[in-house]
Image: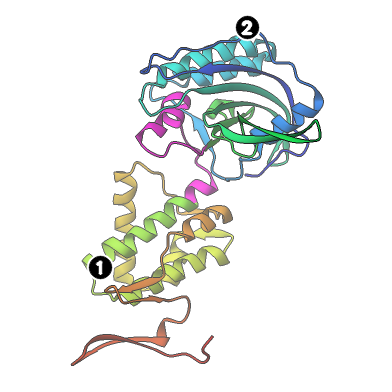
């Protein structure tokens, strides 16, 4: 799924300030829509949408009924009638305030924005954005005064650094909309309040979801499960990791049987892999598909955690990127060793 914001414009938006409930900070609720000129709207559009670069998408969710998800309900009312944005933004600000109970959550400005002309997978749709700015940067103002210059400092929002945000595209309403999420601030337990508590979203089951799950499953199987079931050297583990990533990089579509036959190869190991796949899906409550279109962006992200390195005590690291047959393992009276063959020294 691809998004494009080249023609995107702000139709209307509101701003409130949401404090930390535990710290007895209040909400400052505006009674008016914000009015800005075309130039400022362009800057704000850049601030709001430029951080949405991931191909990972979500849907609003509720364990009982999607209509019990407060954010979903407010967003649906805005899509039904954009003129209700201010009213619903107040409801959203109050809902966010109720979730802002962790002591580490910072107060900040909360924006509800209605966007026109967002393109998602070639389709032009409207979108509602929810954003919160929590951090302030220091800016210098240099201006002429008398026969020289004077400098002052001011605290303000850096338009190149979005703290928290989500974009809800007006499509797939029956599934909880298509939602993109950004959270560049809290990484601890308190971070859950934005995605889990306020938005209450779960990952959309698409090609990114499928690719991410099968790659994660494969990594855990090779690193954790395989050594418990079979005798396998660290070099062979790394080789399997490399071949797995190579398969995903070289193919547009994933087929489980083709993958296991070309990468894992050995029937006994394939059988264990399929068994582990079922256990892994059940343990983590995942739907792991056997056939799907491969997401290139998910492969790029997951490939970073496929470590093709062998760590030897605290002395050496061996990185294996190519032919497994060019490295041999052995042991002599000096200890264990790896023997590497090469053509050129770079």
Read off the residue under disc 2: 31
- Looking at this view, is 335 or 177 the one in front? 335
Seen in the picture, residue 134 relative to 94 is either above or below; the reply is below
- Looking at this view, is 193 or 288 the one in front? 193
Compute the Cα span from label 1 to label 2.
63 Å
Could you tell me which residue is drawn at 41 percent across and 81 percent down?
324
> Does the magenta-highlighted stretch encompass residue 281?
no
Q: Residue 106, percent across and down?
A: 45, 26
Could you tell me which residue is drawn at 42 percent across and 63 percent down?
306
Read off the residue under disc 1: 227
Q: Is residue 16 visible?
A: yes
Mark 2 residue element: loop
Could you tell me which residue is drawn at 38 percent across and 25 percent down?
63
Q: Residue 322, percent across and down?
A: 48, 78
Extreme front residue here? 147
Extreme top residue here? 31
Judge from the rendering whether residue 38 lies leftward or rightward of residue 166; answer left or right.
Answer: right
Seen in the picture, residue 47 relative to 73 is either above or below; the reply is below
Boundaries of the magenta span: 183-210
């Amino acid at each position: 799924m691809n998004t494009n914001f080249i023609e995107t414009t702000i139709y209307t938006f509101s701003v409130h300030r949401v404090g930390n409930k535990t710290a007895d900070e209040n909400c400052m609720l505006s009674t008016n829509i914000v009015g800005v000129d075309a130039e400022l709207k362009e800057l704000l559009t850049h601030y709001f949408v430029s951080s949405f670069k991931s191909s990972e998408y979500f849907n609003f969710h509720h364990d009982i009924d999607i209509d019990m998800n407060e954010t979903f309900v407010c967003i649906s009312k805005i899509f039904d009638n954009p003129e209700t944005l201010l009213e619903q933004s107040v409801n959203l600000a109050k809902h966010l305030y109720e979730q802002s109970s962790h002591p580490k959550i910072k107060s900040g400005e909360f924006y509800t924005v209605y966007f026109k002309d967002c393109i998602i997978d070639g389709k032009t749709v409207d979108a509602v954005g929810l954003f919160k700015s929590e951090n302030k940067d220091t800016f210098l103002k240099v201006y002429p005064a008398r026969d020289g210059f004077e400098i002052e400092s001011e605290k303000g929002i850096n338009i190149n650094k979005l703290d928290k945000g989500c974009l809800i595209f007006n499509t797939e309403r029956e599934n909880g909309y298509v939602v993109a999420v950004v959270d560049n601030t809290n990484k601890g337990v308190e971070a859950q309040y934005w995605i889990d508590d306020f938005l209450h979203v779960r990952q959309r089951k698409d090609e990114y979801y499928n690719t991410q799950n099968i790659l994660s499953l494969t990594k855990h199987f090779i690193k954790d499960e395989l050594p418990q079931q079979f005798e396998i050297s660290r070099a062979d583990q790394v080789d399997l990791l490399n071949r797995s990533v190579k398969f995903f990089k070289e193919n547009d579509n994933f087929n489980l049987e083709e993958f296991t036959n070309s990468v894992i190869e050995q029937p006994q190991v394939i059988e264990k892999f399929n068994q582990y796949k079922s256990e892994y899906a059940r343990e983590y409550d995942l739907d792991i598909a056997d056939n799907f279109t491969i997401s290139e962006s998910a492969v790029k992200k997951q490939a970073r955690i496929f470590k093709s390195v062998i760590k030897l005590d605290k002395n050496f690291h061996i990185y294996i990127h190519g032919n497994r047959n060019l490295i041999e393992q052995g042991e002599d009276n000096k200890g264990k060793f790896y023997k590497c063959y090469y053509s050129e020294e770079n």
